[in-house]
Image (cartoon, grey):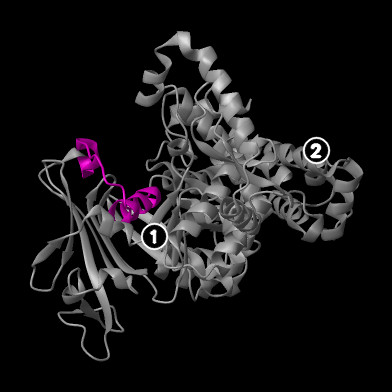
Amino acid sequence: MRIRRLKIENFRGIKRLDWTLPPDQRLITLIGPGDSGKSTILEAIHLLLGDRWSVSFSDVDFYHVDLSASIQIKAILTDVPTSLLKDNTFGFWQRGLDDGGGLRQEPEDGLEPCLVVRLTVDESLEPQWEVVRGDGETRSITSSQRRAFSTFRVDDRTDAQLRWSRTSALGRMSAKDGTEREALAEAERAARAALNGHKSSAMNDLAKAIQNHANEVGGSSFNAIHAGLDSSRSGMGANLALYEDTVPLMAYGLGSRRLVSLAVQQMAAGDRAIAVIDELENGLEPHRAVRLLSYLDSDPYSQVFVTTHSPVVVEQAPIESLSVVQSASGEVNITSLRGAGDVMNALRRAAPSSLLARKVIIGEGKTEHGVLISCFEAWDRQRSSVGLTTAAGEGLAIQDGNGGEKAVNRAEAMAPLGCSVLALIDNDVRTADPHVIKAEQAGATVVRWEHGLCIEAQVCSRLDADELQDFISLGIECRGAESTVIDDLRAVCQAEVSSLNVQDWLRTNDIDMAEARNIVATAASHGKRGWFKSVDSGRALGGWLLARCGSPSLKAIVSRLDQIRTFAYGESLATEAVWAGTVDEQR
């Protein structure tokens, strides 16, 4: 069975979602920023198609707690189990689905038979599961019929239903009579001994099958899974549980328990199952998470929906399985990366965390990357001190664009995904201009320095002699020695440079201030010998700029940094008082 289209209205953080799924896609990996609705989508699928006989809703399950608008979760299903297509079930309620995803009243020739199922919850908080026909007529679905949908969920509570707990009603009732604890303990010991001596080929075969399937999923390296008493509560071992040798599997780590739970539920559900797995990587090392994803992608089961916030999973997942979820005022959109080009594929390999963000800033290279990191660290401290959100709270990711054209190409590729994208690039290479136009047309913001300038040239363009001297001192710190900086200057300067004193240049070398700025800017940006060609040195440059952001010489730099700040935080804070606070921090 497969979901071909899913519609959700007024459920938790989702006001509206209308999602058409590719007909041949079995693994759907939902990625995107936090609070975009990914987990809610999985919960909606499980509520609609799961077999829980008692499901309770509350007011907070309604979007904005508005009970005047009913919750509706509706799906178009194909390859429905035959038990649900008999004449006395829903055989006469089938509809037709065309190649474009359009619904027809009857499953005519050339159309794919399907069922439309719907869950509705109104202000009475009573859920109603129904099959819906084209004329609007409905027929109720029982919990036993929903069981035939074979939809299950894997989460952190997978073993809760397998044992008694101290907080359960059964556990509390059994624990009331403290005088029987010793007798119950003796009974448990006798029962365990009897069970260990009991040989059941059927039970052993099942345990062996579970062991093989759990190892295939990547649960662990199991060698001796067998049935034993559930000893999770002393004196109350009336239930059976799975053991690895003498250790109950419920005593294993979260990741292993989740994987074994997945294996067991898959075996029980059969080959038409729909599985939903929230936070796929939860409890798993990266290599086991990647192995699980690979297994799910090659698995013959009908459909698997997973969510992840792991950059490793995003990087390693088949790109055609990735779908980016973005939400704005409750309107949720899902964009598949299926068919994405080389730029997107390279981006998710190089900067996978960007696909998990609401806002993305792409610096041209390591220099810009370091400057941006330094700025946002300072801005975050300033905002935190007055109770405002940080860049992380705004869902911001910063990445190295690996070059001007590549940076704007990445911005162009990311803009259609629904996230806000800004690229910060130099303005000294004209070959980037057409790429900038395309990125802006796609919806990205591109910030450039003044015409003809790279970042180092922009910084130096209006510095006075003392400020230029300070800039050279910063270069010495980053390059490690004065002699190295002198060599850098000589490599780009026709005049003989024997010292690093700007005033000496102006007095003795027939160099005016404009030429001095140009010499320093060229040396600072020259090839791999540039002074700020690493993230760490870029961070040093960012701190240097923030400490002098009140200087008229840096007005062009400050205006662009404030544009970036406004993009990230949603408002401009480049007032005299705020910048003064930033300056004090840097000092």
Earlier residue among tags 1 and 2: 1
Which residue is tagged 1? 418
Residue highlighted by disc 2: 477
- Judged left or right of residue 125, residue 499 is right
Return the x and y of residue 587 as percentages of the image width and height.
64, 25
Nearer the viewer's eye, disc 1 or disc 2? Answer: 1
In the drawing, does residue 161 fall left or right of residue 539?
A: left
Q: Is residue 159 above or below residue 587?
A: below
Circle 1 sits in a helix, a strand or a loop, which is it? loop
Task: Compare residues 129 and 451 and report the one nearer the observer.
Answer: 129
Amino acid under disc 1: Gly
Residue 235 in magenta stretch: no
In depth, the one of 206 and 431 nearer the eye is: 206
Check disc 2 and give the amino acid type.
Glu
- x and y percentages locating residue 583 in the rendered image: 57, 28
From the viewer's perspective, tell me whether residue 105 is left or right of residue 553: left
- Which image quarter: residue 110? bottom left
Stretch in magenta: 36-64
Q: CA distance from mark 1 to mark 2?
A: 41 Å
Residue 417 visible in the displayed image = yes
Reply yes or no: does residue 46 show up in magenta.
yes
Q: Which mark is residue 282?
A: none
Question: Where does residue 566 sit, x and y in percent of width and height?
Answer: 42, 44
Which residue: 80% across, 58% down? 528
> Looking at the rendering, in which quadrant would you find the N terminus?
bottom left
**Image point 45% across, 36% down: which residue?**
160
Quadrant in the rendering for residue 12 = top left
Circle 2 residues within 10 Å: few <14, some 14–19, many ≥20: some
Figure check: 257 above or below 424: above
